[in-house]
Image (cartoon, rainbow, N blue to C red):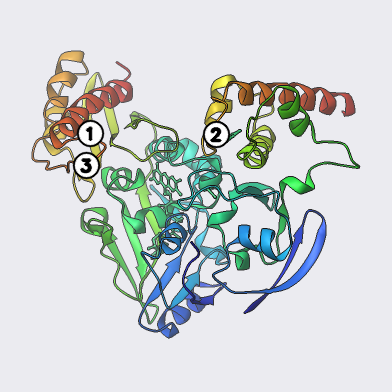
Amino acid sequence: MTQINVRVDGASYSDDVEPRTLLVHYLREQLGKVGTVVGCDTSNCGACTVHLDGESVKSCTVLAVQADGSEVTTIEGIAEGGELHPMQKAFHEKHGLQCGYCTPGMIMASIDLLKNNPNPSEHEIREGIEGNLCRCTGYVNIVRAVQQAAGKMSSTAGAQA
Amino acid sequence: MIPASFAYARPTTVDEALQAIAAGGDDVKIMAGGQSLIPVMRLRLAAPETVVDLTKVAELRGVREDGDSLVIGAMTTHTDILRDPLIAQYGKLIAEATETVADPAVRHRGTFGGALAHADPAGDLPAVALALDAEFVIAGPGGARRSVPASAFFVDYLTTALDEGELLLEVRVPKLGEGWGVRYEKFNRVAQAWSIVAVAAAVRMEGGRIAEARIGLTNMGSTPLRATATEQALVGADVSLETVTAAAAQAAEGTEPSSDLNAQADYRQHLARVLTGRAVRAATGL
Ligand SMILES: Cc1cc2nc3c(=O)[nH]c(=O)nc-3n(C[C@H](O)[C@H](O)[C@H](O)COP(=O)(O)OP(=O)(O)OC[C@H]3O[C@@H](n4cnc5c(N)ncnc54)[C@H](O)[C@@H]3O)c2cc1C
Ligand code: FES
Ligand code: FES
């Protein structure tokens, strides 16, 4: 067992983990953060995407010990004061989901995309979420949701500036 | 599935890493970004006794200049490469290939050195390193350094010149500045997919003629290859559609690509010719 100290969604945790524990299993099984899901065994689907020190990662392809000393943000940590994050709202309003299994990862990947590129073209959105697979929607509404969130988020950022 | 149990070491310097590797028993695996190693361990295709994780070895990360060369630390992530100003200026071929690797989340963790040490025939960076005649700087168990040229580094399928206990430290590539045109042309069918075939081309032009040509082929054999016949046909030739087309027609000469679910060997050879034509046309501005 190895001790790790990590901040997850704003709270600090100190835990013993086996080195082989994947970050996604630590989040789900030790912290109960079951909003982050596992969709594959091959690092392809992106359903498990979280932010590690502000950058998107596939949490099934990171060891929990590697998060020691880091800040993790999951889908459970992005709403503020009971208000959905603009990206969550946009997925809801634009029907960017059907079964919803890919959604936590899609949202975390999309937030990462907008951080690096606040006004992406449709093509850039499709490239930005290329590591996230959806078996239901055909992606059209997902792209629309990201476009809506980009508009909202840049206009709020503009209003604050 | 989750990986089998292993002992875990997280060194912070190269010396500590070499010690941890030496002390790790018979079956030690070095972990860079883990983006190939963790999937393989999850599928239990690898079950090392010890994992030595390099993510905290800061001295291995970053790009610097050394005279006419760029020196790229093994732990420089794909994302670092895409944001690096020296790469943007002198390493555009590396950047073009890196952009096609996997997806943003994998590129945040996967590394330049890890992708080369992994030596997957379908990986995008080995052919680029070969085309650039990169030099691989390697540290051995006692700390001794040696340097291996790309032509000797890629030995076979998933096999490099790295011996047990050795650590890849950095990779030196020539700066390609004024006069050089480059292009990485990758053919695949779905998002975040590996290359079925890809071509890395770097061409230096002088007074309307081709002075130097470097062409690397991805996934045309168990290691990356140079399209030697095409290179020879291009050097000294004028920059024209006819010469480039004729030279590209020789791109698959001497190759023995595999046949698999993605493509038959003869189709791969066809792709090599077509992609070489596209890459050289783009690199020369035709
Ligand atoms: C979904 C997905 C899609 C992908 N698509 C592509 C693609 O299209 N093109 C592509 O090129 N790659 C692709 N990759 C692989 C990606 O590029 C990886 O980043 C890369 O292959 C391995 O880099 P890494 O840093 O993660 O290395 P690791 O996985 O940590 O290590 C890989 C191997 O190299 C060895 N190693 C690593 N560093 C060193 C060192 N410094 N010294 C000695 N040995 C070392 C390790 O022991 C291990 O055997 C993909 C990966 C995934 C998960
Ligand atoms: S669970 Fe599929 S990429 Fe992580
Ligand atoms: S909504 Fe079902 S997988 Fe995307």
Task: From the image, tell me which residue sits under label 2.
Answer: A134
Q: Report x, y in % for residue A34.
A: 70, 53
Quadrant location of the C terminus of chain A in the rendered image: top right
Which chain does the residue under circle 3 lie in? B
Image height of B259 relative to A142, above or below: below
CB at disc 2 and ligand 3 closer than 8 Å: yes
Task: From the image, tell me which residue sits under label 3.
Answer: B260
Q: CA distance from mark 2 to mark 1?
A: 45 Å
Number of numbered labels in the structure image: 3
Quadrant location of the N terminus of chain A in the rendered image: bottom right
**Mark identifier at residue B157:** none
Query: Do we see residue A18 in this rendering?
Result: yes
Please name the amino acid that badge 3 sits on.
Asp
Q: In front: mark 3 or mark 1?
A: 3
Image height of B68 relative to B96, above or below: below
Q: CA distance from mark 3 to mark 1?
A: 34 Å
Q: Residues within 10 Å of mark 1 (few under 14, many from 20)?
A: some
Q: Residues within 10 Å of mark 2 (few under 14, many from 20)?
A: many
> Is the residue at mark 2 from the same chain as the one at mark 1?
no
A77 on left or right of B246? right
Q: Report x, y in % for residue B28.
A: 40, 76
B75 on left or right of B185? right
Q: Nearer the viewer, residue B246 or A144?
A: A144
CB at disc 1 and ligand 1 closer than 8 Å: no
Q: Secondary structure at mark 3?
A: loop
Please name the amino acid that badge 1 sits on.
Glu
Image height of A3 relative to B63, above or below: below
Q: Residue furthest front?
A: A99
Task: From the image, tell me which residue sits under label 1.
Answer: B212
Q: Nearer the viewer, residue A23 or B51?
A: A23
